[in-house]
Image: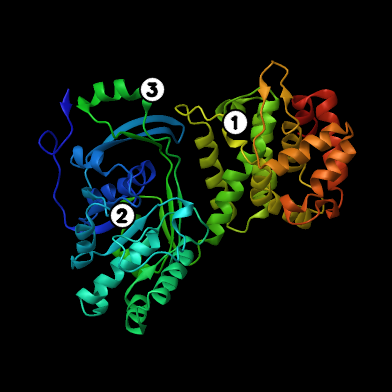
């Protein structure tokens, strides 16, 4: 078996036009895979310089393989199982700005640089007032980016053609707006002046994006057979699902420069990211949050098995198509296509997605993902959505703890104050008190949900049914 490097594999040399903050599995299986496709199918012809956003990371490992690695896509594509391997060659080099600060700053001096892409986790886009312009480098990602932009501004004497197009991929709603605000905070903190501020505003664009692809990461259990198949000793293989979506809130001139949509990819340039964010949260995350406790308390452990179960599968379909979809404002065919894609993802034969892994912090998740839909449905239809109400009762029951009918332990996990509240309410043995007490928890909901007409009685009725008849019989009763 060969080592994987540019001596043993073909690596095309392309102009360095993209700076990428982050070297983790997601960016390598999503953004770098998209850039590889753009290089293959359009005249994009660009390579990526990876910058490690924190002082400990994987750049040495990447450089050890000359930044070559394989993406293993697995899943269903129009009902057909796919399991492919593609060698990605778009990263030219990877830098650690903590040990290679000069090389990092020199990226700003390369005239053909045009894009900055990042995924530094949700905590990455924060303002740290202890960062200084002369730090080598600033500790925060926005601090490092401001240092780079300021150095570029000075290098090219404020040339408006040398601005950068910036796509943050952090999982924050309106991530581009947040990043831009933070850069302004550094411009002010470091007194970088009005000329630089104007150059940043006129020459650069920071665009909000929404990313969507499940990336399990390094395939520990399959790695021996993958290496055997490749005949390369690749220790950076990254597994991902087939589905991908990148929504970029940017004008068409940006799409012309970054022609991902011309490469047959699911990349959308739109005037507003908001309806797509709402669609994803509502039709992907929303069903996840309620199917998990319903499935687990029905004796089902894996999302795929829940979808294929004769009763729970119908419940999931009801919540998605009959309830949550009715609360969204995008065209119906578009919503139906997205929902069917989501079901295909839930049914991925290669991923054993444990429902208990989704159960972490279920109450805050229900509050952001399902409660808005519950309220909108009530407003539009004049009645409560039975599936979502049952999902809430299932979460409340799951948080009671104890053991399942088959002896499996029920181990809820949430903020301690929520855990204490549920323990005390269930200790009363009175489902009326449990329903009222949970719905009254302003610390969870930001309001008293007992004020929603009929909700308290409906939650209590579901709690009683689950205690008396069991979860499956309760689900059947609402279908």
Residue 292 lies, in percent from the top left, at: 64, 33
Q: Residue at x 75, y 54 (%)?
A: 375
Q: CA distance from mark 2 to mark 1?
A: 33 Å
Q: Is residue 16 left or right of residue 300?
A: left
Nearer to me, 85 or 435:
435
Determine whether label 3 and label 2 are within 8 Å by CB. Answer: no
Disc 1 target residue? 355
Between residue 235 and residue 182, name the one nearer to us.
182
Q: Can residue 393 be seen in this snapshot? A: no
Query: Which quadrant does the N terminus fall into?
Result: top left
| Distance from Cα at disc 3 to Cα at disc 2 | 29 Å
Residue at 30% from the left image edge and 48% from the top image edge = 32
Reply above or below: 278 against 387. below
- Residue on which the image places disc 3: 221
Q: Nearer the viewer, mark 2 or mark 1?
A: 2
In this picture, is 91 found above or below 224? below
């Amino acid at each position: 078996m060969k080592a994987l490097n540019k001596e043993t594999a073909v690596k095309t040399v392309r102009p360095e036009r993209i700076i990428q903050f982050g070297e983790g599995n997601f960016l390598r299986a999503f953004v770098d895979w998209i850039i590889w496709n753009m290089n293959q199918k359009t005249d994009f012809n660009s390579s990526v310089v990876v910058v490690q956003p924190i002082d400990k990371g994987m750049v040495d490992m990447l450089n050890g393989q000359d930044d070559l690695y394989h993406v293993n896509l697995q899943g269903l594509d129009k009902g057909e199982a796919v399991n492919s391997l593609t060698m990605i060659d778009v990263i030219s080099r990877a830098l650690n700005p903590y040990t290679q600060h000069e090389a990092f700053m020199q990226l700003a001096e390369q005239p053909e640089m045009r894009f900055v892409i990042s995924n530094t986790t949700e905590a990455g886009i924060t303002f740290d007032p202890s960062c200084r312009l002369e730090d080598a480098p600033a500790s925060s990602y926005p601090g490092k980016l401001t240092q780079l932009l300021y150095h570029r501004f000075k290098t090219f004497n404020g040339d408006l053609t040398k601005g950068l197009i910036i796509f943050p991929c952090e999982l924050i709603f309106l991530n581009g707006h947040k990043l831009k605000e933070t850069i302004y905070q550094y411009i002010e903190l470091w007194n970088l002046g009005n000329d630089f501020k104007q150059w940043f505003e006129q020459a650069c664009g920071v665009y909000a994006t929404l990313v969507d692809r499940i990336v399990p990461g390094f395939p520990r259990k399959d790695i021996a057979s993958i290496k055997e198949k490749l005949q390369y000793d690749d220790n950076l293989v990254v597994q991902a699902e087939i589905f991908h979506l990148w929504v970029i809130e940017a004008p068409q001139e940006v799409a012309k420069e970054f022609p991902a949509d011309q490469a047959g990819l699911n990349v959308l340039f739109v005037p507003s990211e908001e309806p797509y964010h709402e669609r994803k949260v509502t039709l992907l995350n929303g069903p996840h949050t309620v199917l998990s406790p319903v499935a687990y308390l029905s004796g089902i452990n894996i999302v795929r098995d829940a979808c294929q179960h004769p009763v729970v599968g119908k419940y999931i379909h009801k919540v998605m198509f009959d309830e949550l979809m009715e609360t969204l404002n995008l065209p119906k065919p578009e919503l139906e296509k997205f929902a069917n894609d989501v079901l295909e993802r839930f049914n991925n034969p290669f991923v054993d997605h444990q429902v208990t892994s989704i159960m972490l912090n279920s109450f805050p998740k229900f509050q952001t993902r399902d409660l808005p839909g519950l309220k909108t449905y009530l407003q539009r239809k004049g009645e409560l959505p039975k599936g979502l109400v049952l999902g809430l009762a299932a979460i409340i029951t799951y948080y009671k703890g104890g053991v399942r009918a088959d002896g499996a332990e029920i181990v809820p996990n949430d903020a301690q104050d929520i855990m204490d509240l549920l323990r005390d309410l269930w200790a009363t043995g009175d489902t009326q008190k449990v329903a009222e007490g949970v719905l009254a928890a302003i610390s969870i909901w930001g309001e008293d949900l007992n004020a929603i007409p009929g909700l308290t009685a409906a939650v209590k009725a579901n709690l009683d049914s689950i205690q008396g008849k069991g979860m499956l019989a309760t689900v059947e009763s609402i279908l």
